[in-house]
Amino acid sequence: MKQVKELLQEMTLEEKANLCSGEDFWHTKAVERLEIPQVMVCDGPNGLRKQDDKADHMGINESIKAVCFPTSSAVAASFDRELAYHIGEVLGKECQAENISMLLGPGMNIKRSPLCGRNFEYYSKDPYLSGEMGTSYIKGIQSKKVGACVKHFAANNQETQRMNGNSVMDERTLHEIYLSGFKKAVCEAKPTGVMCAYNKINGTYAAENKELLTDVLRNAWGYEGFVVTDWGAVKDRVKGLEAGLDLEMPGSDSSKVNDRKIIKAVQEGRLSIEQLDRVAGNILKFVKNAVENKDGSAQFDLDADYKEAVEAAKECAVLLQNNYDVLPLKSDAKTAFIGGFIEKPRSQGSGSSHINSNFVPSIQEIIRDNDNIIYAKGFDLDSEENDETLIHEAVTYAKASDYAVIFAGLPNRYESEGVDRKHLNIPKNQNILISEVTKVQPNTIVVLFNGSPVEMPWKDDVAGILEMYLCGDGVSEAVMALLYGEANPSGKLAETFPIKLEDNPSYLNFPGENGTVEYHEGIFVGYRYYDKKQMDVLFPFGHGLSYTTFAYSDLHVSKEKLTETENVEVSITVTNTGSVFGKEVVQLYVGEKGSKVRRPEKELKRFEKVGLNPGENKTIIFTLDASDFAYYETRIHDFYTNSGEYEIYVGSSSRDIREQISLTIKAKKELPITISRETILGELMKSPGAQEIFSQIKLKTEMENADTDVDAMGEGSREMAEAMMVEMPLGSLVSFGLMSDEQLEGLIQMLSYSNDK
Ligand code: BGC
């Protein structure tokens, strides 16, 4: 293919405009005259959904046989960057073999509410963790010279009114929570594509949002790839193009009409040819890279990749509860396996990410030869109603066994793209079954299959809980290995499991009304909220047990005072104090003490997964700089680190902090104070320049005199007066007769000048 610049010189206006939309559901357009081929994209993120024949939106028509890997909520629970990278690598190789130039994933939206129907496709409630996992996954795919496409940019956190809802939030929340994972992925992994979301953000559709697509994505983050619509997200094509949108997908009759609108806009002088060249150039660059990076030798080995999926699934499971070490199961103990999921384990979610799995053995198939396991169905997966006969059989089997393992969770109909959940319950018949079994069998273990949190009314009655999430085609093999201790659980929750739905910070504002959802909880999403309010939760963010135990010791910082240009090394030693090999996710959180701005108690800033043999220890060194302690400051429209005292917490979960240490930070520059009649004295007096001016104009003495007058107002009145002074706007100095209007104007000028210096 010729150089992009050359092609742009040779292309007609019509050819350029036509290139701005797809040929069909999955292909870009070819321009035969100039030997520009079409290239294909397909859905991910947890496998290849490549539709060969009839293409459609919601996975109704079959796609090719492929391997389903753990969905993103499961991958996030692994807290394992290498795993995310490796899954990306495998998928990249599969794409090469199937002639796919870009995989539509990862989904990087924040799981604001546990009700979002698509949560299984997203990583976490925490932007740092989402950013880390997404970045690794993208790097993995792109290491095979195939593009990844982060989606859905941005603030697409629910399925209710998913195509036209308006996500309304303040600037700080947008940047600190909803954009920062995308930022990391874009800046560090440089994805080939960014898919803009369907929804509006603060009133403007993502597909037409210049602030997002140009000011933030390209100008602030330096993005050089191309922006594709979510499928069917275009409203006003020309407006979108001007805002920074490149490719419209899918290709359809309506997209052809839009191509013509682009031509007309250029002809009428409403759109410059330079703007169209920029868009066509971005698309050509994608096509050219795809063509030049084609690896003809790549092969898609379904069997080998299935084995990879089994190994991946083992890394994602989270051992939520293990009273008196009920797990792992003893292989010679009589065990009742109960539940409809034994025949049909749930491995993935529904919608556009749905994979046509080649091979998903049932748990029943895996346990076939084990005489110590007896199987009872317990409940019907397709129904909510109790079946007394099934319960009776399950209870009888459980009573006659040493253990009962109940495979429970959310059936397919509960979790899907396109619909939000209405509650956090698992079906009623499953809850009843669990409670009946626990009455006869204290060694009851619940294994859960679900993409997002569920309520567990039986938590205190069961001995063990193993959260499998939706962990792909390897689910049955992985669950058996984990239950019997051939693999040791090492996942941690990438989200908080609340006790009940009503505890969730978004509860009162989800899914919104009349097409608008207001993110009133602001930055307090997930553990940021539960910790601030000191609430009890079912299981906290970062929680996950192991068949071994870990001790933490020797937390050190390389310096106790940090300036904005320096790094600090934080070291911690972790020891496996149990008797089997295990992996621990060491988590580092930071929190500002006595902050002047509203901040969470602590925020995840680093983590590392380490594998240790019994008795083995390892010292982990985390390197932080001042930006790791920053928040988004709306006065400067950027991240900012306050000078002050911070705490570094290191532990095994957000609520199991093992060691902590303090650190002082000196910011390079104090925040500018905007000086006007509205500026309060307390704010102003923090600036040394202002203090100097105040003393020069002898205002201080007058204020002191004013203070003495209020002694008559009773005990503590001096303190009260001082407090009132702190809150007094400059303008009030005139109202209280402390200076004239002219003097105040002069003072404001002097203060503004000294503040700018
Ligand atoms: C989904 C995207 C998906 C696209 C193509 C849309 O409805 O939101 O995530 O990649 O369809 O199937």
Image (cartoon, rainbow, N blue to C red):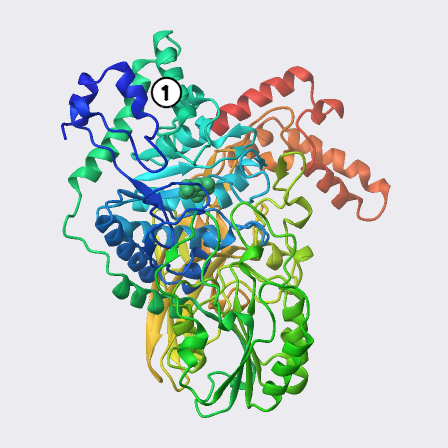
Is 70 situated above or below 295?
Answer: below
**Disc 1 residue type (three-letter):** Asp
Quarter, ligand 1: top left
Indicate the secondary structure of the residue bearing disc 1. helix
Evaluate whether residue 125 shows in this view: no
Q: Residue at x 30, y 54 (%)?
A: 88
Image coords of residue 228 (percent x, y): 37, 34
**Which is nearer the eye, 223 or 744?**
223
In the picture, the quarter occupied by the N terminus is: top left
Q: Is residue 549 visible?
A: yes
Percent of width and height locating residue 101 = 26, 42
Looking at this view, is 15 or 628 the one in front? 15
- Label 1 crowd (10 A; few <14 / some 14-19 / many >=20): many
Q: Is residue 9 left or right of residue 188?
A: left
Q: Pinpoint residue 739: horizontal percent, then vertical percent.
A: 69, 22
156 displayed left or right of 316 = right
Horizontal side of 623 relative to 181 (left or right) equals left
Instruction: Give how far across and how far down residue 686 sits, in percent.
Output: 56, 39
The yes-or-no answer for disc 1 within 8 Å of ligand 1 is: no
Query: Which quarter shows the C terminus?
Result: top left
Near-viewer residue (292 or 710): 292
Residue 569, quarter of the rendered image = bottom left
- The residue at 38%/32% (across/down) is 249
Residue 712 in the image: above or below residue 412: above
Q: Nearer the viewer, residue 67 or 177?
A: 67
- The answer to whether residue 260 is above or below residue 326 is above
The residue shown at (15%, 48%) is: 296
Question: Mark 1 highlights which residue?
Answer: 259
Q: Residue furthest top?
A: 268
Q: Quadrant of residue 750?
A: top right
